[in-house]
Amino acid sequence: GGMLSLIAALLAAYAPPLVTHLHCSPSPLVLVDGNNLRGSTVFALSQQDLALSISRWAEAHALPCVVVMDHGEAQRAWPIGRYAALTLAGPGQSADDVLVRDTWWALKEGRDVAVFTADQGLTSRVRRQKSAGSVQVVPSLALACLLAPEKVGLPAARGGGGEK
């Protein structure tokens, strides 16, 4: 776990400047590849834990955040906090398809978008939209380090969430 811990520590250091960058944007949007994020913690986070953690993080940073997951009987979304929403992709589309669509919509609305994923296919699909606006792809592990450092095998980030 030495190398993974080092990579995770580097990603944790990378994330605060991203949050600062998003705060400089008049209308940022954070999109999260939910299953990919859970995979980056070897699924130590349940879907409920993930939703709760992201809701708290989004509210702490006042950043609008949408978590997209695969499956569901129909495509639907609902709020999971003041700043966060959860979307189920439904049977007809993958979470990746929804993330690409939401990125495109947000860029067309003039928003700055950050997408958290480690999925290479999704990363290239999202990056193809750079001509439409500011979009960054950030490894899921970076967000996992912010949300639940103990689940990633990291010492808790100092000054991260304020929980004792």
Image (tube, rainbow, N blue to C red):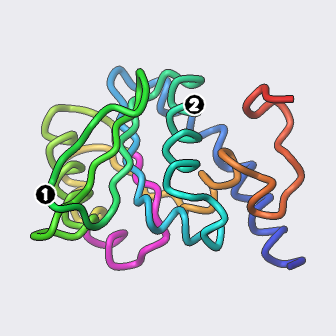
User: Which residue is situated farthest in the front direction here?
Assistant: 73
Q: Is residue 96 above or below residue 83?
A: below
Quadrant containing the C terminus is top right
**Residue name at image x 89 percent, y 77 percent:** 2
- Under circle 1, the secondary element is strand
Residue 143: horizontal and vertical position, in percent?
Answer: 60, 51
Foreground of the two, 48 or 110: 48
**Residue name at image x 49 percent, y 21 percent:** 62
Circle 1 packing at 10 Å, graded few (<14), some (14-19), many (20+), is few
Q: Amino acid at mark 2?
A: Arg
**Residue name at image x 14 percent, y 69 percent:** 91
Residue 28: horizontal and vertical position, in percent?
Answer: 37, 31
Q: In the image, which disc is placed on residue 74?
A: 1
Q: Residue 78's quadrant in the figure? A: top left
Q: Is residue 54 magenta?
A: no
Circle 2 packing at 10 Å, graded few (<14), some (14-19), many (20+), is some
Q: Amino acid at mark 1?
A: Ala
